[in-house]
Image: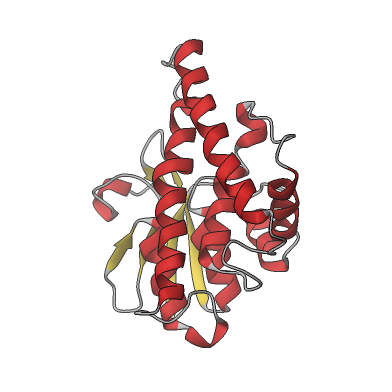
Amino acid sequence: MTYTLYYTPGACSLAPHIVLREAGVKFDLVAVDLKTHTTKDGKDFYAINPKGYTPAMVLENGELLTEGPAITQYIADSNPALGLAPKSGTLERARLNEWLTFIGTEVHKSFSPLFNPANTDDQKKVAKDKLIGRLGLVEKALADGRAYLTGAQFTIADAYLFTVVNWSGNLGVDLTPFAKLQAFQARVGARPHTQGAMKAEGLI
């Protein structure tokens, strides 16, 4: 099977990009300019994904799947032996979804105002303060010595958290207080498939 992942370098689409590489499946990459909403080869991205943002992935049957957590769960469930997500219906899977939801609604969305040039410094400070609080909860979870969010096994939630926290440097978010989170970022960032994805996107 071959998927087609529509991505924007360094955006949240990096998470499914990493997961595709971890899964070892065949896929094509198509870059999207979100300012013009066109693909690298000049196609109207809205004609491909009416939502207009990445990630979006065309499946082997030609259907389009959007939203990072949905895409990464589909990849993981299509390759269950790799352990990228626990079996559906288990408490372990619920814990994974707990993390995916927290990252999406509390961490990812707290970064969003920092990208908006129309927001004032005061507005950005409010967003940054909220973000620091959320990162503190991640730090607390990692304080028990676990390698990854759900334990010893790397999962799709780790790819997602790594992707959004990786925005910190460019947005002036100081991770110095979060030693465990910094170690997590380094651990995930050193994985060969993370390195491969970041190189392919021109990030390193």
Residue 173 occupies quadrant: top right
Q: Is residue 61 above or below residue 172?
A: below
Can residue 44 be seen in the rendering of this structure?
no
Q: Residue at x 58, y 60 (%)?
A: 158
Q: Residue at x 36, y 45 (%)?
A: 53
Extreme residue in the bottom direction = 81
* Colour scheme: secondary structure
Quarter that holds the N terminus? bottom left
Q: Position of residue 177 (x, y in %)?
A: 72, 35
Residue 4 occupies quadrant: bottom left
Can residue 195 be seen in the rendering of this structure?
yes
62 or 117, which is in the foreground? 117
Q: Is residue 132 above or below residue 145?
A: above
Number of labels in the image equals: 0
Q: Is residue 81 left or right of residue 145?
A: left
Q: Position of residue 151 (x, y in %)?
A: 62, 69
Q: Position of residue 123 (x, y in %)?
A: 44, 16
Q: Is residue 179 above or below residue 83?
A: above
Q: Is residue 47 left or right of residue 127?
A: left
Q: Is residue 157 above or below residue 163?
A: below
89 or 31, which is in the foreground? 89
Q: Residue at x 69, y 53 (%)?
A: 143
Q: Residue at x 47, y 20 (%)?
A: 126
